[in-house]
Amino acid sequence: MTFALQGIAISGGYAIGRAQLFSHDRLEAPHYVLQARDLDAEVARFEEAVAMVRAECEHLRDHLPEGAPPELAAFLDLHRLFLEDSMLSEVPKRLIREQACNAEWALAQQTEALLAQFEGIEDAYLRERRHDVKQVADRVLKALLGHPGHAPVKPVDEEPTVLVAHDLSPSDMVLFKRHAYAGFITDLGGTTSHTAILARSLNISSVMALHNARALVQEGDTLIVDGVSGVVIVNPDESILEEYRLRQNQWRLEQQKLRRLKSSQSITLDGVQVELLANIDLPPDVREAIDEGATGIGLFRSEFLFLNRGDLPSEDEQFEAYRQVVKAMKGRPVVIRTLDAGADKSLAWMSQKSENPALGLRAIRLCLAEPHIFMTQIRAILRASHYGSARILLPMLASLTELDQALALIATAKAELKAEKIKFDANVPIGGMIEVPAAALAAEWFARKLDFLSLGTNDLIQYTLAIDRTDDTVAHLYDPLHPAVIYLLGHTLKVGRRLDCPVSVCGEMAGDARLTRLLLGLGLRSFSMHPAHILSVKQQVLRSQTQLLEPLAGKLMRLGDPVRILALLDKINA
Ligand code: PEP
Ligand code: MG
């Protein structure tokens, strides 16, 4: 049956593919399709992994350390029993052959089916045995992943897949980077949630806030993901598929045309130079930034180095990551934002759960509460500054006391490095994010103490309009054109000009080509965005005349009526 679901368009383009329902286990397990001739070898690889885990269990059972609790032996026996059960040792082999898939994938599917069966068991003791099943399956999965053996890992042309999830965390999305999905859709999430931002960074079409896609879509359904209008069509008929194949081709052609702008200077028709910088999450992203013609990194979200792990990255590990980016950018600016953890980017070691995490111990607040974490990071950034042009950016500043405390810690880190005779750039510029309305209104005092400001419009909109950016039920209220938001942007830019303190925008507004001209008119000259958006924003810059845009933007700042604001935006973009 064909049906359509409406959500929020997150990432442009169109995807057509088979639905794959999300589970954490499957995300950890790679998936590829095998040639018929390789299936015997794959089954043998699975058997080897099972045999290896069995031998491990037996060895442990026979060499129990003295004083080991008696339950340990029983526990190992139970694991051996599970391993011998055909549900775990035989069914995956059948799946490998039936689906021509790799062993990890077959095992992950079967584990999931088994766990679902355990969920339905009434007896609490038996139900708890699902943890044992999971542990045994994880051991086999690890054996497979650690010993790829003669696995014929060369995938044949695989049908594109679309991931269907109820919700995805930013940490899931980081793992997701390793998989080549054609698109993804979720029930929850807002336009500027970090999950959505990461989805854009993957540059695949995605729709969020669909409410019940995970329940309605079946594994293997054909899906069209329309990342332009936010529609998902389930099991479309041939005529709809044909229409979307055409749109897909059109989209690809437009993207190819944009590539021609890659080496053009980013300059308006009246000769105003506009800086187009990239936002990155992890060091490897720098390749795409350079590839899309970014003239620097305007936001390195360093917290992604801290996700998906139980410990903290050491000073040396961070130093290596920052140095890698700074060196790759060859003297062009690299703005490294200090740890912005908390809210939807919660870390394993942050045990305290806040009732209202977006207003809780997040970003600079967390760093000032845990100065050793902050100091380690600052030392790492300072050390990397010796290799190029690094800058420090402090997230979520609200009060000047916070800024003073952070500056004092940076000064201490510098003094330490100097005493240790470690090289760093003593004049590394320090900037602050303007993403809390208080900071925008008090921009003057922040600008006086800082070398640059960066408007984080995602949070600025969240905090100004009191909308949780991760909550799909209020996502429709997210409005970058709200007069209060425009006022705060205009005010901060004006203060920056007056005090000669450069201001950039690094929130999602900077990468939205519909808003480029308005932002130019408000006086913005530095945009930082996901690399995938640089060329479409550049296209707007090349067609703009700031002298014409300034009075129009000024007029928009004086409007309150949303309909008139939209009409004027159309005129600005005409
Ligand atoms: C912002 O808030 O606009 C921003 C760039 O930071 P993040 O999206 O990481 O919170
Ligand atoms: Mg922010």
Image (spheres, helix red, strand yellow):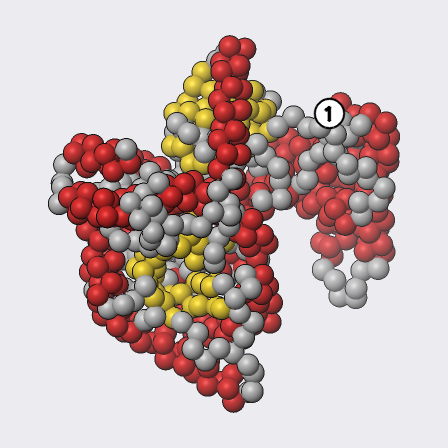
Instruction: State left or right for residue 88 relative to residue 445.
Output: right
Vertical order, 84 against 502 (above or below)? above
Q: Can residue 14 be seen in this view?
A: no
Q: In which quarter of the image is the C terminus?
A: top left
Q: Where is residue 88 in the image (x, y as percent from the top left)?
A: 75, 34
Q: Which residue lies furthest to the front in this view?
A: 270
Q: Which residue is drawn at 45% across and 30% down?
A: 227
Mark 1 CB near ligand 1 (8 Å cut): no
Identify the residue under disc 1. 99
Q: Is residue 491 visible?
A: yes
How packed is label 1: few (under 14 Cα within 10 Å), some, or many (20 or more)?
few
Viewer-closest of 84 and 377: 377
Q: Residue at x 51, y 10 (%)?
A: 239
Vertical order, 253 against 127 (above or below)? above
Q: Position of residue 321 (x, y in %)?
A: 58, 64
Disc 1 residue type?
A: Gln
Instruction: State left or right for residue 456 relative to residue 386.
Output: left
Q: Which residue is drawn at 43% across and 83% down?
A: 412
Q: Where is residue 455 in the image (x, y as percent from the top left)?
A: 32, 56
Viewer-closest of 301 and 359: 301
Q: Which residue lies furthest to the bottom in this view?
A: 419
Quarter holding residue 541: top left
Count of numbered circles on the image: 1
